[in-house]
């Protein structure tokens, strides 16, 4: 664990700063150890770094007030949604204020006729879908955790449905953003398309709290599909499974979800979710559409998987069976952790063009087979995106060092294949070292210029995403 222990570099707080926060927010400004610890850690392998205070915002006015005060005094300000990010995103590298937006959880306007909804940033994806249940619409983006829409926008999140419905990049229509100095902007309107000026929405989507604080989010919605069915198919080896996916995507079959689990991930899921799936590489599919359309997609997929040696193609048409399978898939992270009690996972997240997927997963698995720790692989393979969960002993620095070496090799492999160091989890602290290899110096300079223009005092989530110019 020591390999991922970074030294905190807190900025000095001017006298009276905390007192002013407490006077404005009362109990909604917390300085106790437990609350600060909760907000100074995430699911990454880093040791926590605590903010000096946590403020629980309830309105845009609260956010503006905190931004203005932090801006005036040069204090670090870290937006915080549900804290489910995986790469050290919310750690308070320079101390300061963690601004928790989970209390901004109002659904502001459902425009069913336009298939859009506007929510406050703290609304979570499950809360949103619960509220939409009777409208005939749904919001498809589903990271494994019940993340907030603000956090999902800030990390450009996706999940199992992205192969059909896209990621946050495609689905955020507009944002209300509080800038570092407290000014408030709307990045767009609700028109389906616009050619008016720079695309500020896409600038803030994926900015990881470093350019502005997202206060409200307008996203696209989709009709709840008339018919849904799920299927599972086993394979003798990983390559045949991935080759099937490549063919399915290249043929343009509009699968809603296609997820890969290696045999280790299936074993972990069986134990954790009390299932009895065959413990070999597996693909899990979901089809959305009309009853006839769903049947046609599934039949084509069955044919393709069969050509690649897929066995035991099984249907799960009853909602409760489908829900059990997908809940199990969403719990694959926690299931993996149970394979080695007391372990922590270092979770990788590369994404490559689909034509290179089999090669990338195959080389990675061959290398991991030599590792001194257990691992599982799961993937949103329809997008060319997969994760390795490296299950590490938190007290064994050699394991951490080995996992970092393997991750570096994996990322380099993905970048060499014209892929990316992160398909959906983002950069945070852990992936900064790969930004230059992926983007090059000139593109990084453009990003630094944008950061300097929008946040000249470097108060917003400082120390994240952009590596220092010398790194
Ligand atoms: C078990 C598990 C499974 C996961 N599966 C997936 C997956 O399939 N796909 C995927 O994409 N991710 C996945 N994740 C990662 C995580 O859920 C996403 O990164 C999610 O988008 C983070 O949202 P959050 O609300 O938890 O944000 P936080 O963790 O609170 O914050 C994340 C980043 O966004 C910034 N931020 C948060 N709110 C705001 C705001 N309102 N304005 C500006 N910046 C803000 C923070 O400063 C931070 O940099 C998974 C995580 C876990 C633990």
Image (tube, rainbow, N blue to C red):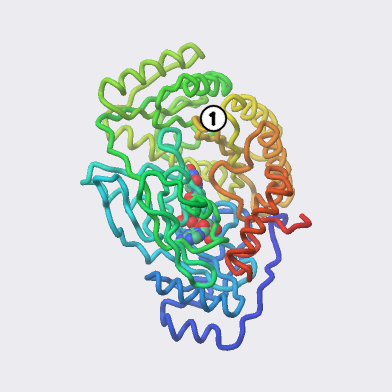
Q: Residue furthest left?
A: 134
Which residue is disc 1 drawn over?
262
Nearest to the observer: residue 174 or residue 410: 174
Nearest to the observer: residue 389 or residue 66: 66
Residue 316: % across, % down: 32, 27
| Residue at figure coordinates x 59%, y 27% from the top left | 357
> Count of labels shown?
1
Q: Is residue 424 visible?
A: yes
Q: Is residue 232 left or right of residue 359?
A: left
Q: Quadrant of the N terminus?
A: bottom right
Q: Residue furthest front?
A: 196
Residue 440: % across, % down: 72, 45
Rendering quarter of residue 355: top right
Q: Secondary structure at mark 1?
A: loop
84 vs 268: above or below:
below
Residue 185: % across, % down: 45, 63
Q: Residue furthest top?
A: 307
Rendering quarter of residue 361: top right
Nearest to the observer: residue 347 or residue 433: 433
Q: Is residue 372 visible?
A: no
| Residue at figure coordinates x 67%, y 39% from the top left | 411
429 vs 192: above or below:
below
């Amino acid at each position: 664990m020591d390999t991922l222990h970074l030294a905190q570099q807190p900025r000095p707080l001017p006298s009276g700063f905390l007192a002013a926060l407490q006077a404005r927010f009362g109990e909604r400004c917390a300085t106790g150890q437990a609350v600060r610890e909760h907000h100074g850690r995430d699911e990454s392998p880093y040791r926590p770094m605590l903010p000096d205070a946590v403020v629980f915002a309830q309105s845009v006015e609260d956010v503006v007030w905190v931004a203005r005060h932090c801006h005036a005094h040069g204090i670090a300000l870290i937006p915080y949604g549900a804290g489910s990010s995986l790469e050290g995103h919310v750690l308070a590298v320079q101390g300061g204020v963690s601004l928790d937006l989970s209390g901004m959880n109002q659904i502001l306007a459902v425009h069913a006729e336009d298939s859009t909804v506007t929510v406050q940033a703290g609304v979570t994806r499950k809360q949103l879908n619960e509220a939409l249940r009777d409208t005939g619409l749904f919001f498809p983006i589903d990271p494994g955790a019940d993340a907030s829409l603000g956090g999902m926008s800030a990390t450009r999140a996706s999940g199992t449905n992205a192969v059909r419905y896209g990621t946050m990049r495609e689905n955020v229509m507009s944002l209300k953003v509080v800038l570092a100095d407290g000014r408030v902007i709307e990045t767009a309107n609700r028109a389906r398309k616009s050619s008016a000026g720079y695309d500020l929405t896409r600038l803030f989507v994926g900015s990881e709290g470093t350019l502005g604080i997202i206060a409200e989010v307008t996203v696209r919605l989709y009709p709840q599909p008339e018919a849904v069915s799920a299927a599972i198919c086993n394979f003798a080896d990983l390559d045949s499974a991935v080759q099937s996916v490549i063919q399915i995507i290249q043929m343009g079959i509009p699968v809603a979800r296609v997820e890969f689990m290696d045999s280790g991930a299936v074993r972990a899921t069986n134990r954790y979710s009390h299932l009895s799936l065959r413990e070999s590489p597996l693909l899990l599919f979901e089809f959305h559409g009309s009853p006839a359309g769903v049947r046609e997609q599934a039949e084509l997929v069955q044919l393709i998987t069969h050509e690649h040696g897929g066995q035991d193609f099984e249907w799960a048409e009853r909602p409760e069976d489908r829900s059990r399978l997908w809940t199990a898939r969403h719990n694959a992270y926690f299931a993996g952790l149970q394979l080695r009690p007391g372990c922590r996972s270092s979770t990788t997240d590369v994404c490559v063009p689909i034509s290179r997927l089999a090669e990338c997963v195959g080389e990675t698995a061959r290398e991991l087979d030599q590792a001194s720790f257990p691992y599982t692989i799961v993937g949103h393979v329809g997008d060319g995106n997969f994760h390795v969960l490296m299950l590490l002993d938190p007290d064994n620095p050699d394991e951490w060092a080995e996992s970092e070496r393997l991750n570096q090799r994996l990322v380099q492999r993905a970048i060499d294949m014209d892929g990316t160091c992160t398909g959906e989890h983002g950069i945070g602290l852990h992936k900064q070292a790969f930004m230059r290899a992926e983007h090059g110096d000139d593109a990084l300079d453009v990003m630094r210029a944008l950061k300097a223009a929008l946040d000249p005092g470097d108060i917003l989530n400082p120390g994240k995403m952009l590596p220092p110019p010398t790194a």
